[in-house]
């Protein structure tokens, strides 16, 4: 009998039996008996129901029933790697735990690294080979397991001569030795040590070498290392190179192009001088100075880009670069050396940066096609021959800061027509504008106190002649020969250096009261001079600034005053 049947039986109890159990009935004892009976029946029913439930919960053998686990999501408790398994876990509500492994991950392939470098070595009786291969390996970047291995063939020219560097740990190439290669390949290693240097004069006068390849281990190229390699056409310079020595590629006449790595911080004097066929060159941003003669006589160099940050250009740096048509000088440059662009006969324009203060000797001499020159206001002096024989130059404005124009500064500028002098100019040296035959428009400022010997000789369109005396502006610069008397016109402020030196047998000179300056040798060797008449007072004469040797070698003469 199951629980349902028991409850159905109990429902059959006489309702009257229950209803008669009213405790308010007239026979109390009978009522209480019925209530007790009812309570006993209910207890019996409850006990029977519990017994039935307990009996039903057991399996046929009488054992308690099995619990079915209900697990949650898997949770990673240990990450997998390429060398260790991972683990993940899940839990039941009852607390039961279940785990399972996570498979190994693939290896993380790293970069190939050189485990053993290839090398050139000295042969021995037991091992006559001069090349020893290297080994390149790939490792897992996580666990370090070796994933692959390859041999690196030893390359490089055989027979080169080597020497140990002063550090005792690296080698230099000391010479060509018995190598006969036309295409030189310098190895990275020799006898297991890095080759870091090309020694001084290592390949000098090697007339058969046509190309050179340098390894990344090279940091220095010595003085005259490849000088006079006249068949050298190309060279590959490595990143990491720091130094190129003086005259390193001196007169490598067939070298056509070269790219200097960004790592280079110094290129020695005349390193590329005489590289006639060099047409293109790339310079590193790290370069601060173009050394003396660096590109002198690079006859086919047409353009070059100078690095921003460059501070100076040395003497003769681009001298005789006859094909150079254009060059932009960075704003950072503060100094340009003498003859830096001399004989750059294709150069048409030059703009100098604002920090340059001097135009040095012969800087732009013989630049036949130079038409346009812009000088910065900071320039204070134009030195000797700075623009000597610039035949295409037609005009120039001298900056306001210039106080001196040096000797021969513009000599033989045959098409120069106009020069603007600044207020503040003090000195025009000898021969400064000699043979500028078309010069016709200048104004010498009042600040000028010195005009040198023959400064304007040959400037026929400029010189005015009055009573046999030649003038440029308010300066007397010369006189005709065989004059008995020299009369300097009123308004003249100066008599130039050597103006009347050995000009005839004059015995009398008349000078105006406006005179302020008498330069050296103005009346030197005036052997017949007897009298100078000054159109002013003695006090005014004393105030005239006279060079110590203004009348050197002249006869004793008297000075008369009109006031």
Image (cartoon, helix red, strand yellow):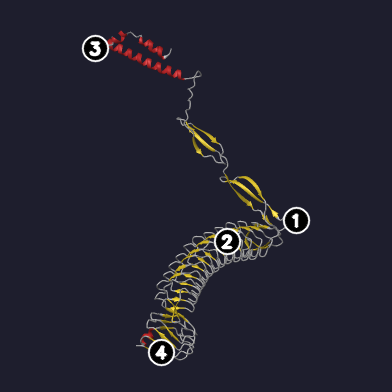
Residue 407: image location, x then y, percent = 50, 75
Q: Earlier in the sequence, mark 4 or mark 3?
A: 3
321 and 164: which one is in front? 321
In 3D space, how far apart are the residues under numbered discs 4 and 3 (Cα atoms)?
Answer: 175 Å
| Outermost front residue | 467
Depicted 299 relative to depicted 547: above or below? above
Tell me how far mark 3 sits from mark 2, CA to CA.
137 Å
Task: Label 3: state its secondary structure.
Answer: loop
Q: Nearer the viewer, mark 4 or mark 2?
A: 4
**Residue 86, percent from left and from top:** 53, 38
For disc 2, the marked residue is 301
Gap in angstroms between the C-alphas marked 4 and 2: 63 Å
Label 2's element? loop
Tag 1's secondary structure? loop
Q: Identify the image quadrant of the C terminus.
A: bottom left
The quarter of the picture where residue 179 lies is bottom right
Which of pointers 3 and 2 lies earlier in the amino acid sequence? 3
- Residue at 26% in and 12% down: 23
Q: Residue 126, which numbered label? A: 1
Q: Which mark is nearer the camera, 1 or 3?
A: 1
Point out which mark residue 24 bears: 3
Residue topped by disc 4: 559
């Amino acid at each position: 009998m199951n629980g349902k049947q028991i409850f159905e039986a109990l429902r059959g109890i006489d309702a009257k039996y229950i209803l008669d159990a009213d405790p308010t009935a007239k026979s109390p004892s009978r009522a209480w008996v019925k209530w007790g009976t009812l309570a006993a029946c209910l207890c019996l029913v409850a006990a029977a129901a519990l017994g039935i439930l307990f009996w039903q919960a057991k399996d046929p053998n009488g054992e308690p029933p099995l619990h079915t686990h209900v697990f949650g999501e898997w949770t990673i408790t240990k990450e997998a790697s390429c060398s260790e398994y991972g683990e993940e876990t899940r839990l039941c509500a009852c607390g039961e735990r279940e785990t399972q492994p996570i498979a190994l991950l693939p290896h993380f392939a790293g970069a190939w690294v050189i485990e053993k470098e290839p090398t050139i070595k000295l042969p021995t009786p037991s091992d006559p080979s001069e090349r020893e291969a290297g080994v390149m390996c790939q490792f897992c970047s996580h666990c370090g397991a070796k994933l692959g291995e390859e041999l690196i063939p030893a390359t490089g020219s055989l027979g080169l001569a080597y020497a140990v560097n002063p550090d005792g740990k690296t080698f230099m190439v000391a010479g060509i030795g018995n190598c006969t290669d036309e295409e030189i390949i310098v190895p990275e290693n020799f006898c297991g040590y890095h080759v870091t240097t090309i020694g001084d004069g290592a390949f000098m006068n090697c007339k058969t070498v046509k190309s050179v390849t340098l390894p990344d281990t090279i940091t220095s190229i010595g003085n005259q290392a490849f000088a006079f390699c006249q068949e050298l056409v190309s060279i590959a310079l490595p990143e990491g190179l720091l130094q190129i020595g003086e005259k390193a590629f001196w007169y490598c006449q067939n070298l056509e192009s070269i790219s200097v790595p960004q790592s280079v911080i110094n290129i020695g004097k005349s390193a590329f001088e005489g590289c006639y066929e060099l047409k293109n060159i790339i310079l590193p941003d790290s370069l601060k100075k173009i050394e003396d003669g660096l590109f002198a006589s690079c006859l086919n160099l047409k353009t070059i880009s100078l690095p921003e940050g460059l501070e100076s250009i040395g003497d003769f740096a681009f001298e005789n670069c006859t094909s150079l048509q254009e060059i932009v000088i960075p704003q950072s440059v503060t100094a340009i050396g003498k003859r830096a662009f001399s004989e750059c006969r294709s150069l048409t324009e030059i703009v100098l940066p604002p920090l340059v203060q001097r135009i040095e000797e012969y800087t732009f001499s013989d630049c036949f096609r130079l038409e346009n020159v812009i000088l910065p206001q900071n320039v204070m002096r134009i030195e000797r021959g700075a623009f000597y024989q610039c035949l295409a130059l037609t005009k120039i404005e001298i900056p306001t800061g210039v106080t001196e124009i040096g000797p021969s500064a513009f000599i033989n500028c045959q098409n120069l027509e106009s020069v603007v002098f600044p207020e503040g100019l003090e000195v025009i040296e000898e021969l400064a504008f000699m043979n500028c035959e078309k010069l016709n428009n200048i104004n010498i400022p009042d600040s000028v106190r010195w005009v040198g010997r023959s400064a304007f000789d040959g400037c026929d369109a400029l010189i005015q002649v009055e009573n046999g005396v030649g003038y440029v502006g308010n300066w007397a610069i010369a006189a005709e020969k065989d004059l008995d008397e020299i009369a300097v016109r009123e308004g003249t402020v100066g008599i130039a250096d050597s103006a009347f030196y050995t000009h005839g047998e004059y015995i009398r000179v008349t000078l105006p009261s406006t005179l302020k300056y008498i330069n050296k040798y103005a009346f030197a060797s005036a052997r017949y001079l007897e009298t100078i008449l000054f159109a002013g007072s003695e006090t005014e004469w004393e105030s005239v600034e006279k060079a110590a040797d203004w009348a050197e070698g002249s006869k004793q003469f008297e000075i008369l005053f009109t006031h």
